[in-house]
Amino acid sequence: MNNNPVIPVILCGGSGTRLWPISRDTYPKQFIPLVTNKPMLIDTIKRISSRKDFEPPVFISLDIHRFILLDELKKENIRPKAIILEPEGKNTAPAVASVALFLQHEEIDPIMIVLPADHVISDIAIFNDCLDKAIEYAKNDWLVTMGITPDKPETGYGYIKKGASIDSKNLCFKVDAFVEKPTLETARQYLNSGEYLWNSGMFVFKTGVFLQELKKFSPDILNTCKEACEKAKTDLSFIRLDKPSFAKSLSDSIDYAVMEKTDKAVVIPLNAGWSDLGSWKSLYEFGEKDKSNNVISGDVIHEDTKDCYIRAEDRLVATLGIRDLVIVDTADALLVANKDQSQNIKSIVNVLKDKCRNECFTHLEVFRPWGSYKNLAKGDRFLVKKIAVHPGAELSYQMHYHRAEHWVVVSGTAIVTKDGEEILLREDESIYIPLGVKHRLKNPGIIPLEIIEVQTGSYLAEDDIQRFDDIYGRSET
């Protein structure tokens, strides 16, 4: 084994609120195909998948996204070293500290490559060359971050001010300062000076050095993460950090907790076509333009339309005589915004949260460990869903107190357990599950099972469920 094995650490906990209504709490942007036909998470892994000198990656994710993450990894046959679950989001410092503590028990002072799951990089060769340089500096006990060479006065990113070079080739610099998102005029000054880089949030360092500096500058975070790791439990394919212990941790970024305070922080400039796709405007800038300078996705007809980003998810979108707009249409929400206001979408999300609107939390299609369901129609005392069950998967053995269900098989084969009796259903066959009857749905086949479910009753929310058995370890009620 190498003295310092190199382990990618993929941060999957972001919420991506500025890309609402596509990105939502229960299904954020890292799991969505925004640039290629693969989710951004998978694109992130594929950038380093050819590296034979790297160990399998470690993923750290919010608990609510665990089955989405696992499903995406299985689709690509990616076998992680570990999947660590945060009970709640506490920013990057506690997340990375928890992974570092886990790896400290597994390896001999490994080098961690910390990569957010929701970035896009065009030139993978340059990126990997930068990683090689960062690894060499990390071996010499530097805490390395990659700073993006700016090409415009960007107000949506934090900045890093370069200090003195630490090598003769000016490839790596001491970090002089981390700077918050600037005004437009200040951003212009940063760009013209040549002394500033965008803060990418990507890091490379030895586990031991990072924990040593965390202990020095943010001991409270280290101690609570230690407790959360010591009390962690293994659950199916996951390592669950202890919830009460982790809840006590401060919410802080690596920048604030360590990098701004340590004398070991260095930055390597990276110019590889990077973006964090943190807004619809950045997605527009990264996208392929048509002859009218529009970025179009989906079923869109546009006349006399210029400099717009238009995305149609479920239906036709037609535009006429508009300029500089972002239009994003989903099954349950429509966003129309000035392109220059796209950094402020979070304010819309905050209003939705204040009003407890489901549109900020979930899509009409909701993912479960066994597959997914999509709401098709809803009215007084009825709800219609399309349910898709993966081959070999099954729902929990359950009961509902306030609703009955009628299932019709559209495609595939189903085994329905109804009060202990197993019933085989094929395409175009149906079954009725009365209120209060224990039941389970299973797909015994090798193709996806699709059914239409019609619920009727006085209360049709998802929390009307009593679980008696569940292969995914979900709670009984």
Image (cartoon, rainbow, N blue to C red):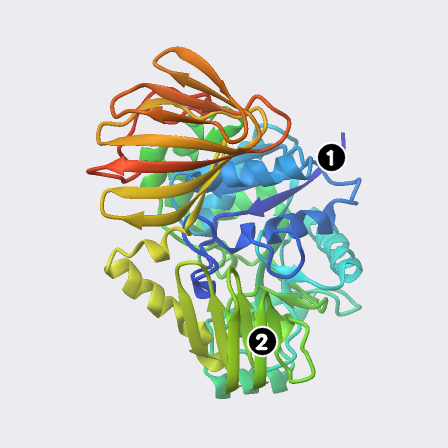
310 w.r.t. 244: above or below? below
* Between marks 2 and 1 in the image, the one whose residue lies nearer the viewer: 2
List x then y, in percent, for residue 161: 57, 73
192 left or right, relative to 393:
right
- The amino acid pointed to by label 2 is Ile
Let me know if residue 161 appears in the view: no
Q: Could you tell me which secondary element the residue under label 2 belongs to?
A: strand
Which residue is pictured at 41% across the width and 21% down the height?
Answer: 440
Residue at the image position 80 percent from the left and 40 percent from the top = 52
Quarter holding the N terminus is top right
The reply, left or right, for residue 419 in relation to residue 183 is left
Outermost residue, front side: 428
At label 1, which amino acid type do we have?
Asn
Location of residue 287 in the rendering, given as x and y in whole percent from the top left corner: 65, 71
Q: Residue 405's x, y, as percent?
A: 33, 31
Secondary structure at numbered mark 1: loop
**Residue at 47 percent of width and 78 percent of height:** 182
Q: Which residue is mark 1?
A: 3
Looking at the image, which is closer to me, 390 or 355?
Answer: 390
Mark 1 burial class by Cα count in 10 Å: few <14, some 14-19, many 20+? few
Residue annotated with mark 2: 301
Q: Is residue 342 shown above or below 396?
A: below
In the image, residue 341 above or below residue 375: below
Quadrant of the image containing the C terminus: top left
Earlier residue among tags 2 and 1: 1
